[in-house]
């Protein structure tokens, strides 16, 4: 879109040193989510989100949204449809301009400077293969995937217009109703399941894989193998909807269009096929003519403005993440949509620094990792998972209702292009542990209090499921993938949730009641674990809350 000019000096890495290390660096990354394509014509024909001007120091705007992920995109669409001129401020870039190779996103197998947010090496949960480390050096750049480190956990997040939708695996799962009612009892579940979940699924462009094709294509042999082994142990499995266009994927397999999901792309962006938010909610919001997006601007402060509204301070970044300007913009209303981590950090820091001192003491509480645990089994050579893996997961093992081992595990790809006999999974366990964000006055930073030990309940739940499968299959865990000989990757999450819980730190619609005109609209509202991949829930809650806010506060 705007400021995302690729720098002339940025180097892509040549394929000549493309070694096993290199190609394995991309492998396994798609787990939980899960080269070489140009934009799918039909997708590029869809309007994309179009910021028209960057905010200037001293501007005053009616509505400012911090962040452009699911919460931000829903808010932008509904505000602009209500006729309200709306500004999004996004710290990442606008991913709409091809790099020197003619592609917008870096592939996963040969990741380059576009892959990683402000780091000198690529980052992914898979640390090693056969004991060989596979992180690769890269040029520090405002790339797409951020692995934000706290003392006990690393939190992966998407950076750019579209937030997590740019990097995720597109798994679009509506949570089990009884669990949704358990975690969010103040929300009318009839309304959610009759109105807002369907609205979210439509807005996101959720679709289903053609079952007949699934049963025969080599690209999903890994999923069929995972299903068969789970069912042999008595576990239920289910198909999982997605926002990746499965019709496009079939054409990829037929060799009719450039490959994206079938070309190893996902966590560093899909050059085609995926209906990320810039193609759906944000594109529709832009089409109203009322939306502007200011990219490469990071909000650092929100405080009451003299008179009315709020002053929002933001740092403008260059392509390498250097601060090149600081601006203050006044806004009548501010919507926090910076994600569970981004919103929680901002609010906890504003309270701690005395800029929003009256915020509830509940701000920062109730954070969880959605019970994420990654693991892999070593299949026998008689149970291959295939040379070809689509990066888009489409099958899960559903053991959630078993109180002894409440787990929903996606059967994840390992798209390396060779047969590795590895069965990968991203388990979502019903781990009750929670962390909290705390302001540290000595550093001026916000810490997340979460220890690796807090993942132990999740490991035990996952172990109960996969020990049983291993026993039945006569297989074992891979210990060569996650570093340190570990069987379970318990040091990261793809699914941060909570930190500013609905009906606790906010009112029942995301308002921060101590500060009229401040709202929270993203994953920080969701209490730590939703039992499935979270973006459909975040989207549907945002639909519900913003509808109410527009009807009552902005009428
Ligand atoms: P999010 O999408 O993270 O958007 C927040 C935005 O705010 C980002 O664009 C930030 O750059 C921006 N931001 C943050 N701080 C600031 C600041 N101070 N100033 C300006 N901008 C800021 O939040 N979920 C699923 O349901 N299905 C999946 O298959 C799936 N796979 C995943 C795979 C990966 C690799 C990852 C990382 C995540 C995955 N997720 C998946 C999680 C999902 O993407 C995530 O729950 C949502 O993106 C969270 O939505 P939010 O609106 O809360």
Image (cartoon, rainbow, N blue to C red):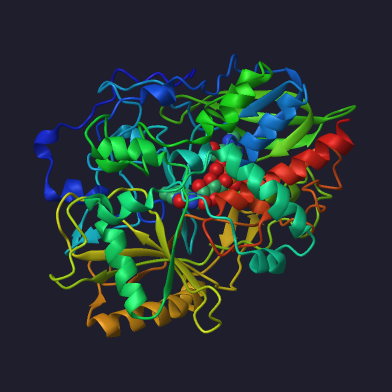
Q: Residue at x 17, y 61 (%)?
A: 420
Front residue of this view, candidates 297 and 526: 526
Residue 522 place in picture, x, y as percent: 65, 46
Q: Residue most toward the left?
A: 16
**Residue 141 visible somewhere in the drawing:** yes
**Vertical order, 110 against 420 (above or below):** above
Residue 192 place in picture, x, y as percent: 72, 53
**Residue 269 visible somewhere in the drawing:** no
Front residue of this view, candidates 344 and 234: 234
- In the rendered view of the protein, which quadrant contains the C terminus? top right
The image quarter in which residue 295 lies: top right
Front residue of this view, candidates 354 and 136: 136
Task: Please state the total of marks drawn on the protein image.
Answer: 0
Q: Residue most toward the front?
A: 212
Left/right of residue 442 with respect to residue 186 in the rendered view = left
Left/right of residue 210 with respect to residue 283 in the rendered view = left
Residue 461 place in picture, x, y as percent: 47, 78
Front residue of this view, candidates 321 and 257: 257
Left/right of residue 209 with respect to residue 16 in the rendered view = right
**Vertical order, 260 against 129 (above or below):** above
The image quarter in which residue 200 lies: top right
Q: Which residue is drawn at 69% across and 66% down?
A: 183
**Vertical order, 410 against 549 (above or below):** below
Residue 455 place in picture, x, y as percent: 48, 72
Q: Residue at x 76, y 53 (%)?
A: 191
């Amino acid at each position: 879109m705007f400021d995302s000019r690729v720098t002339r000096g940025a180097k892509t890495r040549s394929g000549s040193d493309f070694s096993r290390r290199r190609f394995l660096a991309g492998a396994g990354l798609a787990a939980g989510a899960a080269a070489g394509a140009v934009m799918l014509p039909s997708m590029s024909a869809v309007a994309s989100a179009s910021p028209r001007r960057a905010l200037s120091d001293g501007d005053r705007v009616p509505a400012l949204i911090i962040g452009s992920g699911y919460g931000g995109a829903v808010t932008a669409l509904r505000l602009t449809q209500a006729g309200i001129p709306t500004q999004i401020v996004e710290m990442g870039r606008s991913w709409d301009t091809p790099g020197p190779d003619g592609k917008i996103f870096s592939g996963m197998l040969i990741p380059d400077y576009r892959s990683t947010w402000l780091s000198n090496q690529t980052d992914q949960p898979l640390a090693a293969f056969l004991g060989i480390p596979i992180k690769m050096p890269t040029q520090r750049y405002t790339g797409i995937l951020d692995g934000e480190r706290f003392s006990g956990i690393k939190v992966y997040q998407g950076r750019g217009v579209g937030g997590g939708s740019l990097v995720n695996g597109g798994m679009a799962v509506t949570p089990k109703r009884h669990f949704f009612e358990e975690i969010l009892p103040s929300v009318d579940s009839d309304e959610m399941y009759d109105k807002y979940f369907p609205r979210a699924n439509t807005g996101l462009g959720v679709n289903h894989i053609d079952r007949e094709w699934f049963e025969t294509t080599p690209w999903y042999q890994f999923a069929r193998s995972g299903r068969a082994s789970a069912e042999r142990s008595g576990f239920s499995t289910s198909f999982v909807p997605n926002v990746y266009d499965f019709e496009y994927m079939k054409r990829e397999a037929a060799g009719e269009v450039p490959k994206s999901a079938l070309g190893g792309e996902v966590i560093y962006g899909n050059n085609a096929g995926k209906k990320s938010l810039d193609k759906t909610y944000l594109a529709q919001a832009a089409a109203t003519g009322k939306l502007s997006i200011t990219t490469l601007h990071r909000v650092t402060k929100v405080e009451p403005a003299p008179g009315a509204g709020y002053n929002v301070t933001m740092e403008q970044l260059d392509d390498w993440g250097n601060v090149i300007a600081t601006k203050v913009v006044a806004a009548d209303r501010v919507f926090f949509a910076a994600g569970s981590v981004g919103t929680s950090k901002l609010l906890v820091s504003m309270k701690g620094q005395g800029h929003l001192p009256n915020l509830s003491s509940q701000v920062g509480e109730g954070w969880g990792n959605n019970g994420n645990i990654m693991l892999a089994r070593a299949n026998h050579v008689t149970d291959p998972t295939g040379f070809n893996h689509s990066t888009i997961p489409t099958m899960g093992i559903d053991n959630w209702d078993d109180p002894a081992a409440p787990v929903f595990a996606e059967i994840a790809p390992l798209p390396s292009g060779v047969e590795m006999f590895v069965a990968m999974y991203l388990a979502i366990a019903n781990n009750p542990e929670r962390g909290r964000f705390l302001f540290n006055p000595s550093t001026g930073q916000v810490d997340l209090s979460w220890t690796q030990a807090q993942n132990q309940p999740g490991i035990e739940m996952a172990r109960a499921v996969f020990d049983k499968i291993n026993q039945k299959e006569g297989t074992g865990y891979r210990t060569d993938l996650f570093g340190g000989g570990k069987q379970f990757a318990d040091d990261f999450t793809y699914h941060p949730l909570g930190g500013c819980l609905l009906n606790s730190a906010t009112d029942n619609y995301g308002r921060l009641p101590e500060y009229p005109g401040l709202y929270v609209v993203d994953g920080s509202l969701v209490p730590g674990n939703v039992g499935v991949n979270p973006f459909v829930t975040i989207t549907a809650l945002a639909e519900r809350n913003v509808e109410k806010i527009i009807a009552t506060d902005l009428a």
